Image: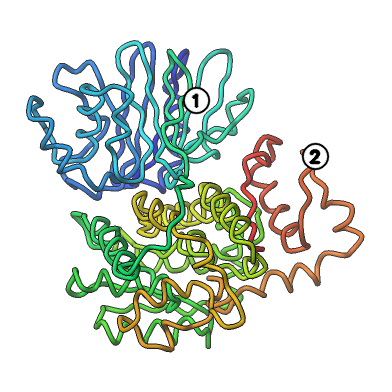
């Protein structure tokens, strides 16, 4: 996992170095730069695959192409087998992508199973791509015909660009032909799954977890003790002996209790951190800086995500699996209980899955990367999403008699204790016991008159609570440029 920065056109190496410095937390292990008259590319490296030999940029055999890359491609060894006519200098997935581009051009992205952003400089053409769901971030802007790209928008805000935009998920960009979409979140024909439905859920999710265990450094799991993370943890534990699990919360938080129970059953190496209100308040400024958002639901859930990422780093674990995505594809959110019409529920699930790139996926990426840890999301495996969204929405409707995500719970019956398997859905921040802390502080410190005066932003966006205004004020201190507000995703599950 890494941070990348690119300047295509009339660029200055000093500007590239500034961008890289602002991304150093994403990759503190190493750095590399490509420089020529047409393109500057830099990479801050977090070493995961081929730790000693994977320095970037990586060049092809004749040194005419090079790549900088952020991500993990899980099927890179299979892809490498079809590239027999190439000489590999490293054992990385990065080099596989470069040689795929040589063979298949812009269609190389269609072979990649993973999460990624990368840029390839091909003498006179720049080619840039982002993974199908936008698990890994990328932003871009332009000034006087020169294009700038970076993994986080903080690295672009200080160059007086005309406008900064998010590079869209599932897209590629060529400096010759512009943007092109290669993936859209599917809306396949619906089916009930048949008599093997539960087995299919288990098998496909197991495949998604196992492929994400590929690493040359230690792997662990964020274990909240909720359904989603407990399933991921239990599957991973069947394939990794001595799996590290991590749980955080305030004193007495329900997550801590349930996580301990799961950890004891699977016999993981369990790590726990209890954080305080004072630690939350003192960390808020740093969290918003790294998160690059003031969305209330996102910031609220960033506290436990930030602390658990820090806990993993302190214990020498660089790669972490998380449970994000299950609520989107299996209708786990509380507000979705009001969606009783199958077609309307399906439309909403499709929307919130498509919007993950600048909501929950942004939170996972930024909070892990703030601590130089890589987060992986098995529930958002492309094949698993295709399957899950093909299931008839009637199977996912919550009623008084049927609990949310009951399909997922039934599929893993017997894998978890019943009190965990049938534990009621709680948001990350609520399960960690910290969801109310800043909202209560904001209520005390911001008057009704202040809220009404400040809630409407210049771009027409309305802040939804005093808590969100509290976060927005801190956000503006870090990112005063008006264009920053336009980059904020909005959670539906507030």
- Look at 50% across and 41% down and name the residue there: 152
Write down the residue under mark 2. 458
Cα–Cα gap, marks 1 and 2: 25 Å
Left or right placement of residue 449 versus residue 42 in this view:
right
Image quarter for residue 288?
Answer: bottom right
Quick one: label 1 or label 2, which is nearer the N terminus? 1
- Look at 47% across and 37% down and name the residue there: 138
Left or right placement of residue 468 versus residue 329 in this view:
right
Left or right placement of residue 375 versus residue 142 in this view:
left
- x, y (%) of residue 111? 27, 36
Judging depth in this view, the residue of 172 and 18 nearest the camera is 172
- x, y (%) of residue 115? 36, 45
Task: Kindly state the secondary structure of the residue where label 1 is placed.
Answer: strand
Left or right placement of residue 220 versus residue 83 in this view:
right
Q: Residues within 10 Å of mark 1 (few under 14, many from 20)?
A: many
Task: Kindly state the secondary structure of the residue where label 2 is placed.
Answer: loop
- Look at 30% across and 47% down and name the residue there: 46
- x, y (%) of residue 419? 43, 88
Quadrant holding the C terminus? bottom right
Q: Is residue 433 above or below residue 83?
A: below
Say if mark 1 contacts mark 2, CB within 8 Å: no
Which circle marks residue 351 in the picture?
none
Write down the residue under mark 1. 148
Judging depth in this view, the residue of 408 and 47 nearest the camera is 408
Q: Is residue 255 above or below residue 393?
A: below
- Look at 45% across and 52% down and name the residue there: 365
Q: Is residue 415 above or below residue 386?
A: below
């Amino acid at each position: 996992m890494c941070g990348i920065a690119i300047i295509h056109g009339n660029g200055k190496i000093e500007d590239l170095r500034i961008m890289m410095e602002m991304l150093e937390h994403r990759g503190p292990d190493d750095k590399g730069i490509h420089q020529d008259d047409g393109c500057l590319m830099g990479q801050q490296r977090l070493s995961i695959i081929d730790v000693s030999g994977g320095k970037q940029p990586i060049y092809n055999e004749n040194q005419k192409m090079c790549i900088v890359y952020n991500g993990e491609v899980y099927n890179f060894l299979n892809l490498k087998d079809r590239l027999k006519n190439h000489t590999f200098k490293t054992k990385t997935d990065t080099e596989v992508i470069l040689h795929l581009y040589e063979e298949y051009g812009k269609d190389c992205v269609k072979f990649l199973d993973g999460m990624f952003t990368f840029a390839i400089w091909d003498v006179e053409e720049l080619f840039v791509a982002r993974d199908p769901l936008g698990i890994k971030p990328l932003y871009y802007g332009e000034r006087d015909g020169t294009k700038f790209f970076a993994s986080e928008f903080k690295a672009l805000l200080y160059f007086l660009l005309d406008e900064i935009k998010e590079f869209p998920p599932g897209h590629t960009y060529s400096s010759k032909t512009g943007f092109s979409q290669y993936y859209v979140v599917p809306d396949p024909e619906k089916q009930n799954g048949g008599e093997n439905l539960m087995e299919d859920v288990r098998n496909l999710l197991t495949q998604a977890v196992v492929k994400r265990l590929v690493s040359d450094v230690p792997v662990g799991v964020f274990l909240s003790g909720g359904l989603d993370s407990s399933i991921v943890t239990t599957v991973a534990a069947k394939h990794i002996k001595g799996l590290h699990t991590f749980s955080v919360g305030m004193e007495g938080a329900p997550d801590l209790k349930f996580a301990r129970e799961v950890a004891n059953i699977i016999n993981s190496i369990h790590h726990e951190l209890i954080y305080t209100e004072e630690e939350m308040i003192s960390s808020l400024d740093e969290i918003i800086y790294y998160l690059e958002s003031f969305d209330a639901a996102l910031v609220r859930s960033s506290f436990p995500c930030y602390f658990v990422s820090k806990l993993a780093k302190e214990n020498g674990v660089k790669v972490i699996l998380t449970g994000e995505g299950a609520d989107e594809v299996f209708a786990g959110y509380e507000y979705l209980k009001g969606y009783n019409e199958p077609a309307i529920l399906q439309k909403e699930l499709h929307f919130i899955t498509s919007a993950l790139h600048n909501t929950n996926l942004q939170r996972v990426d930024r909070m892990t990367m703030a601590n130089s840890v890589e987060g992986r999301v098995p529930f958002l495996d492309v094949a698993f999403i295709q399957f899950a969204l093909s299931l008839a929405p009637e199977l996912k409707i919550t009623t008084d008699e049927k609990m949310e995500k009951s399909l997922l719970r039934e599929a893993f019956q017997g894998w978890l204790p019943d009190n965990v398997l049938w534990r009621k859905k709680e948001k990350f921040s609520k399960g960690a016991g910290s969801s109310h802390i800043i909202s209560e502080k904001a209520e005390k410190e911001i008057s009704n008159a202040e809220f009404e005066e400040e809630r409407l932003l210049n771009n027409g966006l309305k802040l939804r609570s005093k808590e969100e205004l509290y976060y927005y004020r801190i956000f503006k201190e870090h990112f005063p440029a008006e264009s920053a507000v336009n980059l904020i995703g909005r959670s539906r599950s507030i």
